[in-house]
Amino acid sequence: MLILDQTEIFLMQNWDHVLHIFNHIHLQPKDSHGTDFSRVRTWALNGWSKYYRQTLIFSSVVLPEINAIFNNKCFNYADTVEERFKFFINKIVPQHMDTLMRQTLIYVTNYFDFVRLRNHFKREDIGFVQICEYSKEGKVARARDMFFHGDAHFLLYTERFHFFNRIRVKGIRHLIFYSPPNVPHFYYEMCNLMQESNMNKKIGSMSNMTVTVLYSKYDINQLSAIVGTDRAVRMIESERNVHMLVTDAKNTDTI
């Protein structure tokens, strides 16, 4: 936690010193100084301390210099969940509502995200079925059947269910990862379910199949495990918002 009290007084001294502190407060030291790294949080080693810092600034007056601190030097990690959800329902879902985008499986790593998406789909009366770690066998079988025959446009599917059951979901023509899987090879497992032998030939075409992954800079570890560290860094640092990965002709996995 960082607290600035009577902040307007700093303006009567040297404001550059305040900016200097904010610019250097979370830099990694060049020497370890005998640090026991087993006691250091992983997010601190990754240089993410600024996203976990709480900042309290008190002042008797409102000044643009102080507002600039909030706008440029304070980062809110908590908002990433909200931003992902808004982007998904405003951009991704509308793109997949078309009839040509039927049989879309949405892979969700976090159960709380799953519940939020499920509630949104119910409110908006979007046709879907669901499979999670709490689903009974009968409901799982019914959901799989409806999805395969195109009676349900979407299938919400949790990573935890996949971890414990590893069922072979048939009929996936469009696959959306709400966030990169926590277990890297689950990405390939899910993609490889999109084989012609698993498809309902009465619905859709093999030429109309897509895989979409939503990610942010906070998913760098999961993303690195899937596409490699160098490529993940380039994707995160790139100014482009969308990246397309093309499968090598010699590689049988979908990447």
Image (spheres, rainbow, N blue to C red):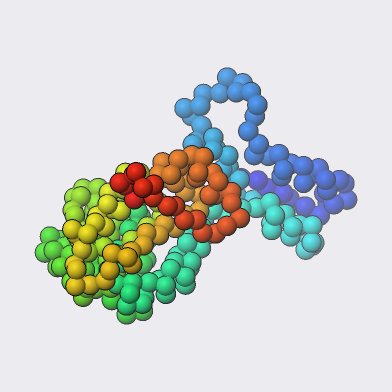
In the rendered view, tell whether residue 124 sits above or below residue 207. below
Residue positioned 55% across, 46% down in the render: 234
Residue positioned 54% across, 53% down in the render: 77
142 vs 121, left or right, is left
Residue 159 locus on image (x, y percent): 29, 52
Residue 51 locus on image (x, y percent): 57, 48
| Residue at the extreme bottom of the image, as rendered | 125
**Nearest the camera: 40 or 72?**
72
Q: Quadrant of the N terminus?
A: top right
**Residue 154 is drawn in which quadrant?**
bottom left
9 vs 180, left or right, is right
Residue positioned 51% across, 23% down in the render: 36
202 vs 247, left or right, is left
Residue 30 visible, this orientation: yes
Residue 200 locus on image (x, y percent): 19, 67
In the rendered view, tell whether residue 174 sits above or below residue 55. below
- Count of number-bearing discs: 0
In the rendered view, tell whether residue 35 sits above or below residue 118. above
